[in-house]
Image (cartoon, rainbow, N blue to C red):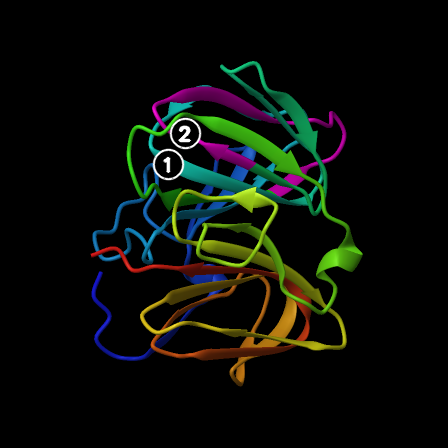
C-alpha cells in the first residue's frame, strides 16, 4: 500500500458494512467474511476491525486461525475465551485479549453472561513473519489508566513500551477523554486508524461520533478533544 499524498479519510459509522445475525450484530470497517470490497481490504498492517455486539450466552464456536495477530478490546460485558493450547479466561470492560495465531490455533469466544450483552472490537494485524509459535494472553486495565491519555496496550519491539508484545511493528492505544485532550505524533511513512467507540470528539477539527473512524496518512499530528472512548492504531504500510 503506497500512500502518495496526505490522507485524513473519515468513515462514518453508517458507511461500515453491517450484518445482523440475530445473536450477533457486527460492523466491519474492512472486508471480512461475506463482505468483500477489493478497494477496502486493509489499512496498512491493520487487516480487520470489527465492532461486535453479542447477545447473552451466545458466541463464536471453536474455529481456526493462522499467521495473524488478533487483539480484542472489550467495551461492555465479559468475553470468555478457550483455545487448543488449554488457555481459558474471561475479560471484562476495558480489558484486552491477545492471540498470536502463528502456526495455527483453534479457539472459541463467547459472551460469559447469560443476562447481558457483550460489545467488543476485534482487530487483526497482519503477521510480520509466518510460522511463529502461537501465543495467548489477556490484560485488565482500569479507567484511570486511560483517562485523558493514550494508554499503550500492545506494541512491536520498535514502538512504545506496552504490556502486550506484538510481532508486527504496530502499536495499539486506548483512551477515555472526558474534559481533556489527547494527541499523537506519527513518524514519517506511518499510517493511523482512529475509532470512536462512543462519544463526541473533534479530531484535527473534524467532528466524529459513535462508530466513526479516521484513516490517517502523511499527517504527522493527530489532535483530539471532546468526550469519548477511543481506539488508535499506528501501523506500517504494507506494500
Q: Is residue 49 above or below residue 214?
A: above
**What residue is at 20 percent from the left and 66 percent from the top?**
2
Residue 113 drawn at (x, y percent): 73, 28
Considering every residue shown, the one lying at the far bottom of the view is 205
Residue 50 drawn at (x, y percent): 47, 46
Counting the numbered discs, the total is: 2
The numbered disc on residue 68 is 1
**What residue is at 59 percent from the left and 19 percent from the top?**
87
* Left or right position of 104 against 177: left
Dot placed on the residue nearer the N-terminal end, 1 or 2? 1
14 or 205, which is in the foreground? 205
Q: Is residue 238 above or below residue 32?
A: below
Residue 7 drawn at (x, y percent): 33, 76
Residue 218 drawn at (x, y percent): 34, 77
* Left or right position of 59 against 28: right
* Left or right position of 174 against 169: right
Q: What is the quadrant of residue 186 in the picture?
A: bottom left
Q: Which stretch is magenta? A: 98-119
Dot 2 surroundings within 10 Å: few (below 14), some, or many (20 or more)? Answer: many
**What residue is at 69 percent from the left and 28 percent from the top?**
90
Q: What is the quadrant of residue 80 in the picture?
A: top right
- Reading the image, the residue beneath label 2 is 101
Image quadrant in which the N terminus is located: bottom left
Contact, CB < 8 Å: mark 1 with mark 2? yes
Give the CA distance from mark 1 to mark 2: 5 Å
Query: Dot 1 lies on which element?
Result: strand
Image quadrant in which the C terminus is located: bottom left
Q: Residue 164 lies in magenta, yes or no?
A: no
**What residue is at 74 percent from the left and 57 percent from the top?**
145
Q: Is residue 88 visible?
A: yes
Q: Is residue 121 visible?
A: no
Amino acid at each position: 500500500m503506497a500512500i502518495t499524498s496526505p490522507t485524513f479519510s473519515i468513515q462514518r459509522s453508517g458507511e461500515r458494512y453491517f450484518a445482523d445475525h440475530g445473536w450477533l450484530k457486527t460492523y466491519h470497517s474492512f472486508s471480512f467474511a461475506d463482505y468483500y470490497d477489493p478497494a477496502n481490504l486493509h489499512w496498512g498492517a491493520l487487516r480487520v476491525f470489527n465492532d461486535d455486539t453479542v447477545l447473552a450466552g451466545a458466541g463464536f464456536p471453536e474455529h481456526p486461525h493462522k499467521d495473524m495477530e488478533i487483539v480484542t478490546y472489550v467495551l461492555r460485558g465479559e468475553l470468555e475465551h478457550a483455545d487448543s493450547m488449554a488457555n481459558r479466561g474471561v475479560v471484562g470492560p476495558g480489558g484486552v485479549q491477545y492471540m498470536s495465531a502463528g502456526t495455527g490455533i483453534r479457539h472459541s469466544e463467547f459472551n460469559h453472561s447469560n443476562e447481558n450483552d457483550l460489545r467488543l472490537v476485534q482487530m487483526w494485524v497482519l503477521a510480520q513473519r509466518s510460522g511463529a509459535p502461537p501465543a495467548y494472553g489477556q490484560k485488565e486495565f482500569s479507567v484511570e489508566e486511560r483517562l485523558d491519555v493514550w494508554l499503550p496496550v500492545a506494541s512491536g519491539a520498535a514502538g512504545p513500551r506496552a504490556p502486550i508484545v506484538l510481532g508486527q511493528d504496530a502499536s495499539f492505544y486506548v483512551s477515555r477523554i472526558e474534559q481533556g485532550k489527547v494527541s499523537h505524533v506519527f513518524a514519517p511513512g506511518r499510517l493511523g486508524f482512529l475509532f470512536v467507540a462512543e462519544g463526541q470528539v473533534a479530531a484535527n477539527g473534524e467532528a466524529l461520533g459513535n462508530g466513526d473512524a479516521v484513516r490517517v496518512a502523511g499527517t504527522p499530528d493527530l489532535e483530539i478533544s471532546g468526550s469519548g472512548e477511543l481506539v488508535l492504531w499506528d501501523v506500517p504500510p504494507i506494500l
